[in-house]
Image: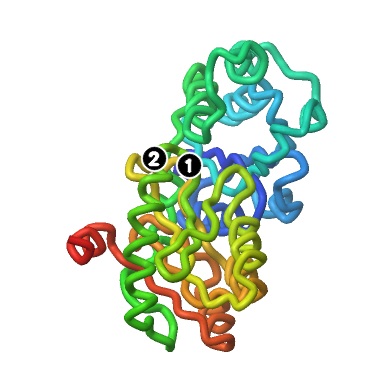
Amino acid sequence: MSSKLEPIGLIAGWGIYPLRIARALKAHGHPVICIGIKNHADPVLRELCDQFHEGSLTRFGDGTAFFNAHGVKRAVMAGKIHKANFFDGFNWWTDLPDWKTTRLFFPHFFSGTKDRKDDTLLLVVVEAFREDGIELVPATDYAPDLLVEPGLLTSTALSETEERDVTFGWELAKAMGKLDVGQTVCVKGQAVLAVEAVEGTDACIQRAGTLSKQGAFCVVKVAKPQQDMRFDVPTIGPGTIQSLIDAKARVLAVEAGKTILLDPDEVIRLADAHGLSIIAREDRALAVKAA
Protein backbone atom coordinates (compact mmCIF):
# COMPACT_ATOMS: atom_id res chain seq x y z
CA MET A 1 0.00 0.00 0.00
CA SER A 2 1.48 3.35 -1.01
CA SER A 3 -0.40 5.50 1.53
CA LYS A 4 1.61 6.68 4.54
CA LEU A 5 -1.51 6.82 6.66
CA GLU A 6 -2.37 3.86 8.85
CA PRO A 7 -4.85 1.28 7.56
CA ILE A 8 -8.24 1.46 9.26
CA GLY A 9 -10.39 -1.58 9.80
CA LEU A 10 -14.06 -1.43 8.90
CA ILE A 11 -16.54 -3.90 10.40
CA ALA A 12 -19.47 -3.51 8.01
CA GLY A 13 -23.06 -4.46 8.69
CA TRP A 14 -26.19 -3.84 6.61
CA GLY A 15 -27.07 -0.62 4.81
CA ILE A 16 -25.36 2.27 3.05
CA TYR A 17 -23.63 3.67 6.13
CA PRO A 18 -20.57 1.37 5.76
CA LEU A 19 -20.20 2.56 2.15
CA ARG A 20 -20.18 6.19 3.34
CA ILE A 21 -17.53 5.43 5.94
CA ALA A 22 -15.36 3.46 3.51
CA ARG A 23 -15.42 6.36 1.04
CA ALA A 24 -14.66 8.88 3.80
CA LEU A 25 -11.67 6.84 4.97
CA LYS A 26 -10.31 6.55 1.45
CA ALA A 27 -10.84 10.28 0.86
CA HIS A 28 -8.61 10.92 3.89
CA GLY A 29 -5.96 8.59 2.45
CA HIS A 30 -6.46 5.60 4.74
CA PRO A 31 -6.30 2.11 3.28
CA VAL A 32 -9.58 0.40 4.22
CA ILE A 33 -9.41 -3.16 5.51
CA CYS A 34 -12.97 -4.43 5.63
CA ILE A 35 -14.70 -7.29 7.40
CA GLY A 36 -18.11 -7.51 5.76
CA ILE A 37 -20.57 -9.34 7.98
CA LYS A 38 -22.06 -12.32 6.15
CA ASN A 39 -25.64 -11.79 4.91
CA HIS A 40 -25.42 -8.12 5.92
CA ALA A 41 -22.66 -6.20 4.12
CA ASP A 42 -23.16 -4.64 0.68
CA PRO A 43 -21.20 -6.55 -2.03
CA VAL A 44 -19.93 -3.19 -3.35
CA LEU A 45 -17.52 -3.11 -0.40
CA ARG A 46 -15.45 -5.86 -2.04
CA GLU A 47 -14.45 -3.45 -4.80
CA LEU A 48 -14.44 -0.28 -2.72
CA CYS A 49 -12.11 -1.45 0.04
CA ASP A 50 -8.38 -2.24 -0.24
CA GLN A 51 -8.84 -5.65 1.41
CA PHE A 52 -12.09 -7.51 2.06
CA HIS A 53 -12.96 -10.52 4.21
CA GLU A 54 -16.43 -11.99 4.60
CA GLY A 55 -16.78 -12.23 8.35
CA SER A 56 -19.17 -14.05 10.62
CA LEU A 57 -20.81 -13.08 13.88
CA THR A 58 -19.66 -16.43 15.23
CA ARG A 59 -15.96 -16.17 14.28
CA PHE A 60 -14.41 -13.07 15.80
CA GLY A 61 -11.07 -14.84 16.04
CA ASP A 62 -10.93 -14.96 12.23
CA GLY A 63 -11.75 -11.25 12.11
CA THR A 64 -9.02 -10.15 14.49
CA ALA A 65 -6.50 -12.37 12.68
CA PHE A 66 -7.46 -10.75 9.36
CA PHE A 67 -6.99 -7.24 10.77
CA ASN A 68 -3.65 -8.17 12.35
CA ALA A 69 -2.43 -9.66 9.07
CA HIS A 70 -2.99 -6.28 7.41
CA GLY A 71 -1.52 -4.11 10.16
CA VAL A 72 -4.79 -2.74 11.51
CA LYS A 73 -4.50 -1.13 14.94
CA ARG A 74 -7.71 0.93 14.83
CA ALA A 75 -11.09 -0.05 13.44
CA VAL A 76 -14.65 1.23 13.23
CA MET A 77 -18.07 -0.40 13.17
CA ALA A 78 -20.74 0.79 10.76
CA GLY A 79 -24.07 -0.59 9.63
CA LYS A 80 -26.99 -2.43 11.11
CA ILE A 81 -26.94 -5.93 12.53
CA HIS A 82 -30.32 -7.66 12.39
CA LYS A 83 -30.58 -8.42 16.10
CA ALA A 84 -33.95 -10.14 15.81
CA ASN A 85 -32.09 -13.07 14.25
CA PHE A 86 -30.44 -13.74 17.61
CA PHE A 87 -33.76 -15.05 18.89
CA ASP A 88 -34.37 -17.39 15.96
CA GLY A 89 -32.99 -20.48 17.64
CA PHE A 90 -29.71 -21.59 16.09
CA ASN A 91 -30.65 -20.45 12.57
CA TRP A 92 -28.40 -17.38 12.80
CA TRP A 93 -25.35 -19.52 13.65
CA THR A 94 -24.39 -19.90 10.00
CA ASP A 95 -20.79 -20.84 10.85
CA LEU A 96 -19.31 -22.99 13.59
CA PRO A 97 -18.25 -20.61 16.40
CA ASP A 98 -14.51 -20.27 17.00
CA TRP A 99 -12.97 -20.43 20.46
CA LYS A 100 -12.76 -16.66 20.96
CA THR A 101 -16.44 -16.15 20.18
CA THR A 102 -17.51 -19.13 22.29
CA ARG A 103 -15.47 -17.95 25.28
CA LEU A 104 -16.67 -14.36 25.16
CA PHE A 105 -20.33 -14.91 24.29
CA PHE A 106 -21.04 -18.13 26.22
CA PRO A 107 -22.40 -16.26 29.30
CA HIS A 108 -24.86 -14.36 27.09
CA PHE A 109 -26.20 -17.06 24.77
CA PHE A 110 -25.72 -20.37 26.56
CA SER A 111 -25.35 -20.13 30.33
CA GLY A 112 -27.88 -17.31 30.73
CA THR A 113 -25.76 -15.64 33.40
CA LYS A 114 -25.47 -12.32 31.49
CA ASP A 115 -27.94 -10.24 29.49
CA ARG A 116 -28.13 -9.64 25.72
CA LYS A 117 -28.75 -5.90 25.73
CA ASP A 118 -27.29 -4.00 22.81
CA ASP A 119 -24.58 -2.21 24.76
CA THR A 120 -23.64 -5.36 26.63
CA LEU A 121 -23.08 -7.40 23.46
CA LEU A 122 -21.33 -4.59 21.60
CA LEU A 123 -18.90 -4.07 24.47
CA VAL A 124 -18.06 -7.78 24.21
CA VAL A 125 -17.22 -7.15 20.54
CA VAL A 126 -14.99 -4.25 21.60
CA GLU A 127 -13.20 -6.58 24.02
CA ALA A 128 -12.82 -9.28 21.35
CA PHE A 129 -10.79 -6.90 19.19
CA ARG A 130 -8.98 -5.21 22.08
CA GLU A 131 -7.59 -8.59 23.16
CA ASP A 132 -5.68 -8.72 19.88
CA GLY A 133 -4.41 -5.14 19.97
CA ILE A 134 -7.14 -3.50 17.88
CA GLU A 135 -8.90 -0.41 19.23
CA LEU A 136 -12.45 0.31 18.10
CA VAL A 137 -13.11 4.03 17.62
CA PRO A 138 -16.18 6.04 16.48
CA ALA A 139 -16.75 5.88 12.72
CA THR A 140 -17.99 9.48 12.84
CA ASP A 141 -14.47 10.60 13.81
CA TYR A 142 -13.67 10.09 10.11
CA ALA A 143 -16.96 11.47 8.77
CA PRO A 144 -18.26 14.11 11.21
CA ASP A 145 -20.31 15.71 8.42
CA LEU A 146 -22.72 12.77 8.64
CA LEU A 147 -23.96 13.98 12.03
CA VAL A 148 -27.06 16.12 11.64
CA GLU A 149 -26.91 19.75 12.73
CA PRO A 150 -29.70 21.38 14.78
CA GLY A 151 -32.63 22.98 13.04
CA LEU A 152 -35.70 22.32 10.91
CA LEU A 153 -34.58 20.22 7.95
CA THR A 154 -37.80 20.41 5.93
CA SER A 155 -40.18 23.06 4.62
CA THR A 156 -43.04 22.12 6.95
CA ALA A 157 -42.78 23.35 10.55
CA LEU A 158 -44.31 21.64 13.58
CA SER A 159 -47.66 22.68 15.03
CA GLU A 160 -48.03 23.45 18.75
CA THR A 161 -49.60 20.03 19.30
CA GLU A 162 -46.68 18.33 17.54
CA GLU A 163 -44.20 20.37 19.58
CA ARG A 164 -45.83 19.05 22.75
CA ASP A 165 -45.72 15.50 21.42
CA VAL A 166 -42.03 15.80 20.59
CA THR A 167 -41.20 17.12 24.07
CA PHE A 168 -43.29 14.33 25.63
CA GLY A 169 -41.76 11.64 23.41
CA TRP A 170 -38.21 12.93 23.93
CA GLU A 171 -38.31 12.29 27.67
CA LEU A 172 -39.71 8.80 27.12
CA ALA A 173 -37.17 7.95 24.42
CA LYS A 174 -34.32 9.05 26.69
CA ALA A 175 -35.72 6.86 29.48
CA MET A 176 -35.92 3.85 27.14
CA GLY A 177 -32.39 4.55 25.94
CA LYS A 178 -31.09 4.70 29.50
CA LEU A 179 -32.51 1.21 30.02
CA ASP A 180 -30.93 0.11 26.69
CA VAL A 181 -34.33 -0.94 25.36
CA GLY A 182 -34.47 1.17 22.19
CA GLN A 183 -34.03 4.70 20.89
CA THR A 184 -37.36 5.40 19.19
CA VAL A 185 -40.89 6.12 20.41
CA CYS A 186 -44.01 6.96 18.41
CA VAL A 187 -46.42 9.41 20.03
CA LYS A 188 -49.80 10.94 19.27
CA GLY A 189 -51.72 13.28 21.55
CA GLN A 190 -49.12 12.68 24.29
CA ALA A 191 -49.94 8.97 24.26
CA VAL A 192 -47.38 6.31 23.36
CA LEU A 193 -48.25 4.23 20.29
CA ALA A 194 -45.06 2.17 20.03
CA VAL A 195 -41.63 1.79 21.62
CA GLU A 196 -38.68 0.36 19.72
CA ALA A 197 -37.11 -2.83 21.01
CA VAL A 198 -35.20 -5.57 19.18
CA GLU A 199 -37.28 -5.20 15.99
CA GLY A 200 -35.69 -1.88 14.97
CA THR A 201 -36.93 1.58 14.02
CA ASP A 202 -38.76 0.74 10.78
CA ALA A 203 -40.81 -2.04 12.38
CA CYS A 204 -41.60 0.23 15.34
CA ILE A 205 -42.93 2.91 12.97
CA GLN A 206 -44.92 0.30 11.03
CA ARG A 207 -46.53 -0.93 14.26
CA ALA A 208 -47.51 2.61 15.22
CA GLY A 209 -49.11 3.06 11.80
CA THR A 210 -51.10 -0.12 12.29
CA LEU A 211 -52.37 1.11 15.66
CA SER A 212 -53.14 4.63 14.42
CA LYS A 213 -54.93 4.17 11.08
CA GLN A 214 -55.23 7.92 10.54
CA GLY A 215 -51.50 8.37 11.05
CA ALA A 216 -50.48 11.95 11.90
CA PHE A 217 -48.24 10.80 14.75
CA CYS A 218 -44.76 11.90 15.82
CA VAL A 219 -41.65 9.73 15.83
CA VAL A 220 -38.86 10.66 18.22
CA LYS A 221 -35.45 9.03 17.79
CA VAL A 222 -32.63 10.00 20.18
CA ALA A 223 -29.23 8.90 21.39
CA LYS A 224 -29.01 7.03 24.65
CA PRO A 225 -28.00 9.19 27.64
CA GLN A 226 -24.92 6.95 27.90
CA GLN A 227 -24.44 6.81 24.10
CA ASP A 228 -21.14 5.23 23.08
CA MET A 229 -20.37 6.82 19.71
CA ARG A 230 -18.43 3.72 18.66
CA PHE A 231 -21.60 1.79 18.01
CA ASP A 232 -25.40 1.82 17.70
CA VAL A 233 -25.50 5.54 16.85
CA PRO A 234 -29.04 6.62 15.80
CA THR A 235 -29.21 6.68 12.00
CA ILE A 236 -31.84 7.90 9.55
CA GLY A 237 -31.93 7.80 5.76
CA PRO A 238 -34.36 7.52 2.85
CA GLY A 239 -35.56 4.13 4.12
CA THR A 240 -36.61 5.72 7.41
CA ILE A 241 -38.56 8.41 5.57
CA GLN A 242 -40.30 5.80 3.42
CA SER A 243 -41.36 3.97 6.59
CA LEU A 244 -42.82 7.23 7.91
CA ILE A 245 -44.67 7.81 4.65
CA ASP A 246 -46.09 4.28 4.58
CA ALA A 247 -47.30 4.61 8.18
CA LYS A 248 -48.76 8.10 7.56
CA ALA A 249 -46.58 9.65 10.26
CA ARG A 250 -46.32 13.43 10.41
CA VAL A 251 -43.13 14.33 12.29
CA LEU A 252 -39.65 12.93 12.84
CA ALA A 253 -37.59 14.47 15.64
CA VAL A 254 -33.94 13.45 16.06
CA GLU A 255 -31.05 14.49 18.26
CA ALA A 256 -28.64 16.95 16.67
CA GLY A 257 -24.95 16.07 16.82
CA LYS A 258 -25.68 12.46 17.77
CA THR A 259 -27.73 11.22 14.80
CA ILE A 260 -26.29 10.09 11.47
CA LEU A 261 -28.12 11.47 8.44
CA LEU A 262 -27.57 9.51 5.24
CA ASP A 263 -28.39 10.95 1.80
CA PRO A 264 -29.73 14.25 3.21
CA ASP A 265 -30.86 15.59 -0.17
CA GLU A 266 -33.02 12.55 -0.83
CA VAL A 267 -34.31 12.52 2.75
CA ILE A 268 -35.45 16.15 2.50
CA ARG A 269 -36.88 15.69 -1.01
CA LEU A 270 -38.98 12.72 0.09
CA ALA A 271 -40.14 14.43 3.29
CA ASP A 272 -41.12 17.67 1.57
CA ALA A 273 -42.97 15.77 -1.16
CA HIS A 274 -45.19 14.16 1.49
CA GLY A 275 -45.55 17.08 3.92
CA LEU A 276 -43.40 15.52 6.63
CA SER A 277 -41.61 17.62 9.23
CA ILE A 278 -38.07 16.66 10.29
CA ILE A 279 -36.51 18.53 13.18
CA ALA A 280 -33.09 18.03 14.78
CA ARG A 281 -32.74 19.34 18.31
CA GLU A 282 -30.11 19.32 20.99
CA ASP A 283 -31.03 17.43 24.13
CA ARG A 284 -30.27 20.43 26.34
CA ALA A 285 -32.76 22.62 24.40
CA LEU A 286 -35.54 20.07 24.90
CA ALA A 287 -34.78 19.72 28.61
CA VAL A 288 -35.04 23.51 29.09
CA LYS A 289 -38.29 23.66 27.12
CA ALA A 290 -39.79 20.77 29.10
CA ALA A 291 -38.93 22.52 32.38
Residue type at mark 1: give it.
Phe
The residue under the point 60% across, 24% down is 64
Residue 213, placed above or below residue 111: below
Characterize the local packing of mark 2: few (<14), some (14-19) or many (20 or more) Cα atoms within 10 angstroms: some
**Are the residues flagged by discs 1 and 2 in contact, CB closer than 8 Å?**
yes
Secondary element at tag 2: loop
The C terminus appears in which quarter of the rendering? bottom left
Disc 1 is placed on an element classified as loop
Residue, disc 2: 228
Relative vertical location of residue 150 with respect to residue 113 in this rendering, above or below: below
Position of residue 238 relative to residue 230, above or below, is below
Amino acid type indicated by mark 2: Asp
Between 144 and 281, the one lying in front of the other is 281
Where does the image place residue 68, in percent across and percent down from the top left?
Answer: 58, 25
Residue at image location 64% in from the left, 43% down from the top? 81
Residue matched to label 1: 231
**Callout 1: few (<14), some (14-19), or many (20+) C-alpha neighbours within 10 Å?**
many
